[in-house]
Image (spheres, grey):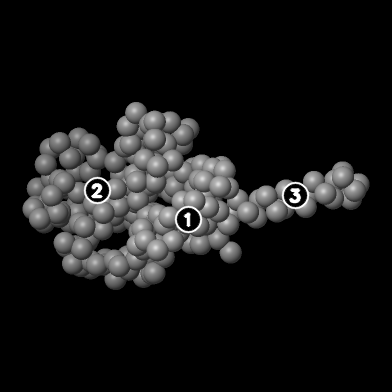
Amino acid sequence: MSPTYVALDLETTGLNPERDTILEIGAVKFRDDKVLDTWSSLVNPQRPIPYKITQLTGIHQEEVEQAPFLNSIAGSLMRFVQNYPIIGHNVSFDLGFLNRHGLCLNNPSIDTFELASILMPHASRYSLGMLAEALGILFPSRHRALDDALATKDLFLALFQRAIELDMATLQEINRLAAHLDWPLRHVFQDAERAKARTAFTGSIGQQLKAKGVLD
């Protein structure tokens, strides 16, 4: 069975986890291209939202003043994420914010930014929006946590397909070099090699059956 992942995204009051805080969390649980469940919540930051953040996200002060505090929803988020690998675009940013504010997720993590830098080396930019456009991913609403998490899920699936399309010798060499490394993307390329092997095997069997007239 294919693995289950959780794509995660945060909206925050700024970029520094030491002085900024979380405004919104979105998460998508998925297996292959099927969304199994979603989780999202605004978070009361207990401070004014900077004007530029409201302009960027569309999140207004009156909305978050009615939202729950992070500590009151932490348990719900932990139960949703469980031990599944977490996927994020610049995932260390999201996990760093959560950790700084008391929610430590020690799950394996996969960074679509890093994955894209390997599989799309000639991309002009590596923002979530630009990569989505380059890959034809629908992404109409941006800078809201759940929408960004859904786009991150789609980006991961598109990049994984690109990994499968590498020739088998390249995949095997990547996996040989990464075999003894503590590299989060190692499992992605191992899964890609297994998926390619399955495809090659079923394709070969199918061709043989066609040749024998078993398949139309």
The quarter of the picture where the N terminus appears is: bottom right
Element marked by disc 2: strand
Residue 50, position in %: x, y? 11, 42
Q: Which residue is mark 1?
A: 175
Element marked by disc 1: helix
Could you tell which of marks 1 and 2 lies nearer the N-terminus?
2
Residue 214 seen: yes
Amino acid type at image mark 2: Glu
Residue 24 seen: no
Pick the residue in front: 97 or 36. Answer: 97
Element marked by disc 3: helix
Residue 111, position in %: x, y? 35, 51
The quarter of the picture where the C terminus appears is: top right
Rendered residue at 18%/39% (across/down):
54
- CA distance for labels 2 and 3: 47 Å
Of the residues tagged 3 and 1, which is closer to the observer? Answer: 1
Residue 98, position in %: x, y? 22, 60
- Tell me if 47 is positioned left or right of 117 in this view: left
- Label 3 Cα neighbours within 10 Å, binned few <14 / some 14-19 / many ≥20: few
Of the residues tagged 2 and 3, which is closer to the observer? Answer: 3
Task: Find residue 51 and report its image quarter.
Answer: top left
Of the residues tagged 1 and 2, which is closer to the observer? Answer: 1
As drawn, 199 above or below 122: below
Could you tell which of marks 2 and 3 lies nearer the N-terminus?
2
Rendered residue at 56%/47% (across/down):
169
- CA distance for labels 1 and 2: 34 Å
Q: Which residue is mark 3?
A: 204
Residue 120, position in %: x, y? 42, 36
